[in-house]
Image: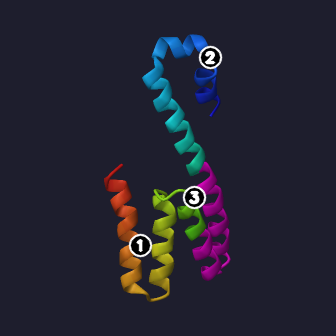
Amino acid sequence: MQDFDTVLNNEEYQKIIGEKECATLAKDKARVQKRMRSNTIKADGDREFYNEKMNAAFKKYEEAVVEDSENEYAYANMGVIALKNVEYLESIDITTKAIDIINNF
């Protein structure tokens, strides 16, 4: 984040890389921030998962994908929980979302 801020807050750097690239950097920074927030929520879900609280973990992973709808790791973990709950079709659907995100990266 510091590197993004260094460039985005420095007029000299902005002149060097241009307006279009600065706009792209600002979008990238926002995307990284969104993923960081989502992964913080996902980590809460991971703790619940490791404590075998599957419903609580699933809810945290759902929160993570609300924050970042492209968080393939949260989707993958949700797929694992659905599989453990013998919800095979749901597991396939959720896991397919994770795979689609990876394939379209």
Q: Position of residue 4 (x, y in %)?
A: 58, 29
Q: Is residue 58 magenta?
A: yes
Q: Position of residue 104 (x, y in %)?
A: 32, 52
What amino acid is found at the position of numbered circle 2 in the picture? Asn
What amino acid is found at the position of numbered circle 1 in the picture? Ile
Which residue is label 1 attached to?
Answer: 94
Q: Is residue 4 above or below residue 49?
A: above
Could you say whether the residue bearing mark 2 is in a helix, strand or loop?
loop
Q: Nearer the viewer, residue 73 or 25?
A: 25
Q: Earlier in the sequence, mark 2 or mark 1?
A: 2
- Mark linked to residue 67: 3
Which residue is label 2 attached to?
Answer: 10
Could you say whether the residue bearing mark 1 is in a helix, strand or loop?
helix
What separation in Å lies between label 1 and label 3 (alpha carbons)?
Answer: 16 Å
Badge 1 density bin: few <14, some 14–19, many ≥20, Cα 10 Å: many
- Tell me where the magenta segment starts and ends, as one range: 36-60
Which residue: 43% across, 24% down? 20
